[in-house]
Amino acid sequence: MYALYRQTLTLIAAPLSFRLGIAAMKVAIAIIFLWIGALKFVPYEADSITPFVANSPFMSFFYNEPAGYKAHLTHEGELDPAKRAWETANNTYGFSRGLGTVELLIGGLTFAGLWNRKLGLAGAALAFATPFVTLSFLVTTPEAWVAALGDAEHGFPYLSGAGRLVLKDVALLAGAWLVLVATARQLLIEVEIEASKLAKGDCFLEPPAPARRR
């Protein structure tokens, strides 16, 4: 039994297993950003992030009338022409498309990191930075917490559906950090190897010939 236990640990801890895990994390991060980034071009997804953007001190200025979002919220799958017209005038969809473009870029760079470490480093750095913004929504967005509608369980620490969705970005933060560190280590090894080659090449260079005396 001990031998099997040790063999299992050895297999899990193998360098190949670590490399596969990092590659899988890159793919997972890429899927998240590519999928959600593409959805940002669809009205229902743009509508759903309105409370986060309207209440954020870092993003609310992108909206023309952030204070009026509550009166124009819609449920997913619901079509209200008047509310959609307001969202259009509010720049809800324009901002969402811009955000979606950034998310598609992050996903693409992270996925490209499977073949190009420098591109992957940029993608991982951006993916790591993103959750710091989204997690701030837990502080700035009232809709992230259960509303006081009569039940005793409301406010902190009772996360609403939107709040629970945001909280999962903690895992994205940690995963992006692992990818960032692993990629930086690989690039550092490449830099050191290149520096070593250059140093060895300098050692074998012939010294310049002495100048002839006239």
Image: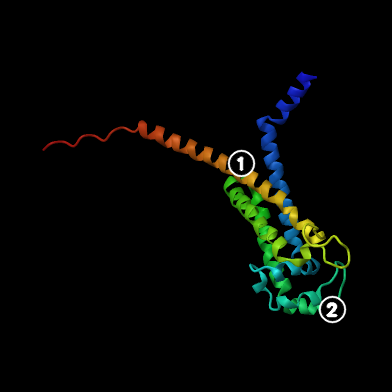
Task: Residue 162 in the image: state x and y as whole percent.
Answer: 79, 61
Task: Residue 12 in the image: state x and y as whole percent.
Answer: 72, 30
| Nearer to the camera, 94 or 90 | 90
| Nearer to the camera, 157 or 201 | 157
Residue 198 visible in the current orientation: yes
Task: Specify the label residue 182 is tagged with.
Answer: 1
Position of residue 110 in the picture relative to residue 42 (left or right): left
| Nearer to the camera, 11 or 120 | 11
Of mark 1 and mark 2, the one earlier in the sequence is: 2
The structure residue drawn at horizontal position 71% and vertical position 78%, both measured from the top left corner, is 65
On screen, residue 77 above or below 191 = below
On screen, residue 73 above or below 112 = below
The structure residue drawn at horizontal position 84% and vertical position 67%, both measured from the top left corner, is 148
Position of residue 199 in the picture relative to residue 159 (left or right): left
The residue indicated by pointer 2 is: 81
| Nearer to the camera, 69 or 79 | 69
Quadrant of res 160: bottom right
On screen, residue 156 above or below 4 = below
State which quarter of the image contains the C terminus: top left
Residue 49 visible in the current orientation: no
Q: Give the residue type that dot 1 points to.
A: Ala
Position of residue 145 in the picture relative to residue 192 (left or right): right
Quadrant of res 91: bottom right
Numbered-mark total: 2
